[in-house]
Image: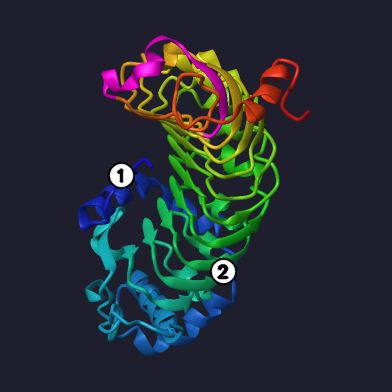
Amino acid sequence: MASFSFPITTTAFVLFLLSLTSNMFNNSAAKHGHKTALYHHQNSYSSSINKAITNTRLQKAYIALQAWKRVIYSDPNNMTANWIGHSVCNYTGIYCAPFPNDTKIQVVAGIDLNHADIASFLPDEIGLLNDLALLHLNSNRFCGILPLSLSHLTLLHELDLSNNRFVGPFPTLVLSLPSLKYLDLRFNEFEGPLPSQLFSKDLDAIFVNNNRLTSMIPSNLGSSTASVVVFANNYFGGCLPPSIANFANTLEELLLINTSLSGCLPPEVGFLYKLKVLDVSNNKLVGPIPYSIAGLAHLELLNLAHNMMNGIVPEGICVLPKLSNFTFSYNYFCEEQGICSNLTSKGIVYDDRRNCLPEKPLQRSKKECDPVAEHPIDCFALHCGT
């Protein structure tokens, strides 16, 4: 499995994010000037605390964080124990930074409660934290449906809600966040189809693996600008659309493990010249390996295991300069070209078990292999969607 490295939440990084989004502060108020119940909630508290907090942005943050604390059912690590009083910048997990348009003013620019094991939900008042550049809530017990007020966080750059208990359809409100670049919703209980608008959004990373998402992968998949896309362990089905080729200028890691993909692996995958990781294991893919993959000079990991692919393992793939891990076990390949039969000599970690390779151990029986050899798949005739 590939490892993903993204910015760690620090005060310095919060400052950096705010510098990227400073020109959006003035526009934010105009675009989101409508009032909701949470703003009336804010006004009911303002008169009692405005003497203690002269900074109105921190005043709103205080209202939001206190409302959030009231709906925390369990905090075994006492992460929010010091969420007392009006000095919100001293709260554990809360990061303040200067307001870009007036550096004398402090704002709550980041929240990092990763791995806190907190049981709670997100209250409507979270929409008052509209100076946030990042919100990291990884590995907690947050539950329920995301509040619509989350759409007020117009400066949000990173949203990590992974490894929680959120439910409901894909939260389309995240698509309205104009500054969002990093979206991590993995290991939750979101269900239903992926909206096609997700791939029209200017995101750097999309993690939606390990949910209950269904339906086919949208045909505009390649419209995204993401460098990392992880869809693993959902119930999509259908084929990988040829539009994947449009990812060519950005995509480096594509993980589609156990997503019920069927059909052939499209040759357009070979257009992804920046690709380092391709994992389509545990699906229902058929047909040969597209020879176009032999052009992926940056490819380090290729996993085709547990499919129904057949034909030849091309030598062009086995001699890729950066390839270090090649797994194609549990398929129906009948021949390894050239050096592919001795990848150990190149220092490549590989697994070719349970195929139809006549001179290799731990292969399928002749009874299993013959029907596949007698009825080869014509991927040119088997277009995506047929």
Whether residue 58 appears in this view of the structure is yes
Disc 2 vs disc 1: Cβ atoms closer than 8 Å? no
271 left or right of 84 in image: right
Image location (x, y in percent) of residue 233: 55, 50
Location of mark 2 (residue): 147
Quadrant in the picture for the C terminus: top right
Dot 1: element? loop
Locate residue 204 relative to residue 235 in the image: left or right. Answer: left
Crowd rating for badge 2 (residues with CA inside 10 Å; few <14, some 14–19, many 20+): some
Q: Nearer the viewer, residue 60 or 295?
A: 295
Find residue 80 and report its horizontal and vertical position in percent.
Answer: 31, 80
The total number of labels drawn is 2
Residue name at image x 48 percent, y 80 percent: 42
Mark pair 2, 1: CA separation: 29 Å
| Residue 213 lies in the magenta-colored region | no
Type of amino acid under label 1: Ser
Residue at 42%, 49% in the rendered image:
24
- Residue 104 location, quadrant: bottom left
User: Where are the magenta residues, as a range?
Assistant: 330-347
- Taking depth in this image into account, of 24 and 126 the one nearest to the observer is 126
Question: Which numbered dot is residue 5?
Answer: 1
In front: 170, or 134? 170
Residue drawn at (59%, 58%) of the image: 171
Name the image quarter holding residue 283: top right
Nearer to the camera, 345 or 228: 345
